[in-house]
Amino acid sequence: MHGRAEDAANAGFAKLGFAQGQIVQELAWDEDCDDAVREGIESVVGSPLEDEEYTDGADAVLVWFREEDGDLVDTVVDALTNLVEHGFLVLCTPRAGQPGAVEPSDIDDAAVTAGLHPAGVSNVSKTWTITRLVAPKTPRR
C-alpha cells in the first residue's frame, strides 16, 4: 500500500487506539486470520506483535475469535491477563455470513460480563469485524 490507501488504513488502526511504541499481544492466530490487519497494526506501533507466550504487560491485545472457538466471555477475560492499566482489547471476529461469524449481541454481552464495553468498530478488513473493547471510564465525582 502506498499513499492515500496506506494513510486510510493507518487511520483505521489509529481509530482503534493503536499508536507508535505500543506493545501488542496477539491471541488465537490461525491461518484464516487477516494478515493485512496484523501488518497494519505492526506498521502503526512500529514493532512485531507479541505471541501467546508473552508475559510482560501489553498496551493492547489482539484477539482472533470464531464461534467454534469456545466461550467468548472466557476468551475475553483471559485476554485481560497481560493488559496494562488503560490498555484495550481488539476483538476480531468473522464478518456476518462468513464461517465462524459471531453475533454482535454476543460480543456486547461478553464485553459487559468481562467489565468492558465496545468502543467502536473499524472497517480495516473485508472478512473480519474488528471491535475495540475498553474498560468503562470511572464516573466523575
Image (spheres, grey):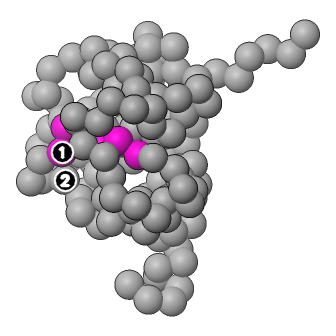
Residue neighbourhood size for the residue with mark 2, other residues' Cα within 10 Å, grouped as few (<14), some (14–19), many (≥20)? some
Q: Report the side of 99 relative to 24 (left or right).
A: left
Membership of 26 in magenta stretch:
yes
Q: Residue at x 46, y 64 (%)?
A: 46
Vertical order, 105 against 96 (above or below): above
**Residue type indicated by callout 1:** Trp
Q: Residue at x 33, y 30 (%)?
A: 55
Q: Report the side of 112 relative to 93 (left or right).
A: right
Which residue lies under the disc numbered 2? 33
Q: Nearer the viewer, mark 1 or mark 2?
A: 1
Vertical order, 82 against 1 (above or below): above
The stretch in magenta equals 24-29
Q: Could you say which disc has been placed on residue 29 in the image?
A: 1
Q: Residue at x 12, y 53 (%)?
A: 32
Residue neighbourhood size for the residue with mark 1, other residues' Cα within 10 Å, grouped as few (<14), some (14–19), many (≥20)? some
Circle 2 SS class: loop
**Residue type indicated by callout 2:** Cys
Q: Quadrant of the C terminus?
A: top right
